[in-house]
Amino acid sequence: MARAVSTQRKTLTTALAWAIGLVIFFPILWTVLTSFKTEAQAIANPPIFLNFDWTLENYAIVQERSNYMRFLWNSVILAGGSTLLGIIIAVPAAWSMAFVPSKRTKDILLWMLSTKMLPAVGVLYPIYLLFIKMGLLDSRAGMVIVLMLINLPIIVWMLYTYFREIPGEILEAARMDGATLKEELIYILTPMAIPGIASTVLLNFILAWNEAFWTLNLTAVDAAPLTAFIASYSSPEGLFFAKLSAASTMAIAPILILGWFSQKQLVRGLTFGAVK
Amino acid sequence: MATKASRSAARLMMAPAVILLMGWMLVPLTMTVWFSFRKYLPLRGGDLGPAGFDNYVRFVTSSSFWPAVWTTLIIVGGVLLITVVLGILLALLLDQPMWGQGVVRILVIAPFFVMPTVSALVWKNMFMDPTNGLFAHLWRLFGAEPVAWLSEASMGSIVMIVSWQWLPFATLILLTAIQSLDSEQLEAAEMDGAGPLQRFGHIILPHLGRAITIVILIQTIFLLSIFAEIFVTTGGAFGTRTLTYLIFQRVLESQNVGLGSAGGVYAIILANIVAIFLMRIVGKNLDA
């Protein structure tokens, strides 16, 4: 039975929650607003909220001067490529762990998780050196591999927790009817696994998009994604607020929208299934 | 029952993931450990022979080591304290009935999806800039002298930026945990005359215990290695050089690979201590 909540209390809660929500969201809102101002309006005191002459010129300047599209394209390739590659490698692994578990399955899962805990800075130089030796420094291929590897444990884990929820009886029934492993995969498992795989893709795309240790240290020009693009605004261009805002808005908008769709998966993915 | 054939098929399917991660872990790790015992200066002749434990000793006796440890502890501790306490309060609030709950949730979660370089730069310039930042405008409005946040209150500023990024994570996980609480239990307690504080202390908080532990452990692992936030704001100046940043500077900026690698080994050991606790909890969950 739901408790009756007085309208007065609900109003109060609503007001408080909205106020806090807006404060937390404010830096993002402010960035988006500033991106449509002129540089003079962007630093005006007192600050201007909405009554300014909306302009798109910052976006044009940012694109023209720093070739935003190239960084965006790199971000898409790095995040998309690493996620796709990770899924291809992780699906069979997670499938076998979920449906043909052995005594060592749990140990393997925990060990995979432990590789995620390895601090990146501890292995920075070896990776840097290997990249130079193999000609992978500042290459998309090299970055796709690194981003795939750092997210692989999360991908395997997420898929594993989703696959485990698929009832094993269905598979056994299929086997009784003489379905081969291949048929089992194509006709039974794939349709049931698609939602889980989609959520995993979404979350890992976001994580790869925002990754800012390896992308800052191993890319320069050719493979540099949006994280590096923004870092180049560190100084002195950072003092041009309107342009910084336009660049920032372009870097976060795609992922912010994807992110809002992935709220639920975020919890499961980042806690390795420990909180659902 | 799994047949022998399906078992070997299973092993085959697991092989690529296991082999790749094994390589990803062992190859660089072995190299780091190897370098840490060498005098290795790429710009001054490369590998100059064995160094014994010199690098390990020099790393901890250098004048920047202890400050870096403190900085790391303050950032990790400060961010944990802020995000967990505010996260619990916020989760409790968001769990209440209200209008537009979905929208508020979206607003609160948004910072988590902002890439670290963007949030660091936006805060640094548009909010904390001593001339044109919003805080400076606000301070002047009240007749106060604007503060150069990132140089005069550098640690507080970084803790605040990072907390803003991680508060959504803590809130979201704690909210998920609160929502799994049996509401009948709370109602029964209320009927028995338990006040809001008692209900929080005796029912909600114990129920959240595991989720809080998980938030703390996972955040600690990520916070120990924050990099971009410092890279684009202070570049390690004004006392904001963390252990991670110190190692980065040793390895890539001053190209003292032996010394940096010894630091890396320390960082790996530190992270593993935290990881062991996290793995225990996650492992227990696997058995359930």
Image (tube, grey):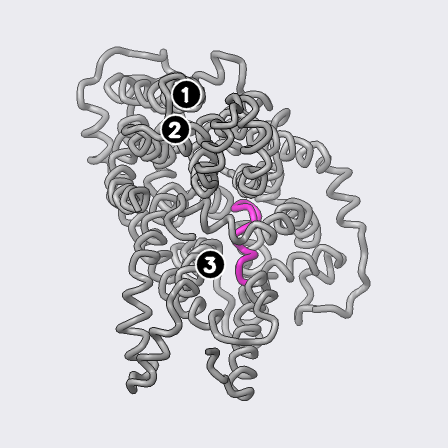
Which residue: 79% across, 44% down?
A: A60
Chain letter for the residue marked with disc 1 in the picture: B
Q: Is residue B152 visible?
A: no
Answer above or below: position of A154 versus B93.
above
Q: Residue B258 in the image: state x and y as whole percent.
A: 30, 22
Q: Is residue A134 visible?
A: yes
Check if residue B112 falls in the magenta segment.
Answer: yes
Chain letter for the residue marked with disc 2 in the picture: A
**Pointer 2 residue:** A100
Is B162 on the left or on the right of A65, as rendered? left
- Please give the label number shown on residue B6: 1
* Most foreground residue, A5 or A53: A5
* Quarter of the image where one finds residue B43: top left
> What stretch of residues is rendered in magenta?
B108-118
Name the element at disc 3.
helix
Q: Residue A59 in the image: state x and y as whole percent.
A: 76, 47
**Pointer 3 residue:** B172
Mark 1 and mark 2 in contact? Answer it, CB < 8 Å: yes
Is A82 on the left or on the right of A60, as rendered? left
Q: Residue A152 in the image: state x and y as whole percent.
A: 46, 31
Answer above or below: position of A78 versus B99.
above
Check if residue B164 falls in the magenta segment.
Answer: no
Name the element at disc 1.
helix
Is A102 on the left or on the right of A194, as rendered? left
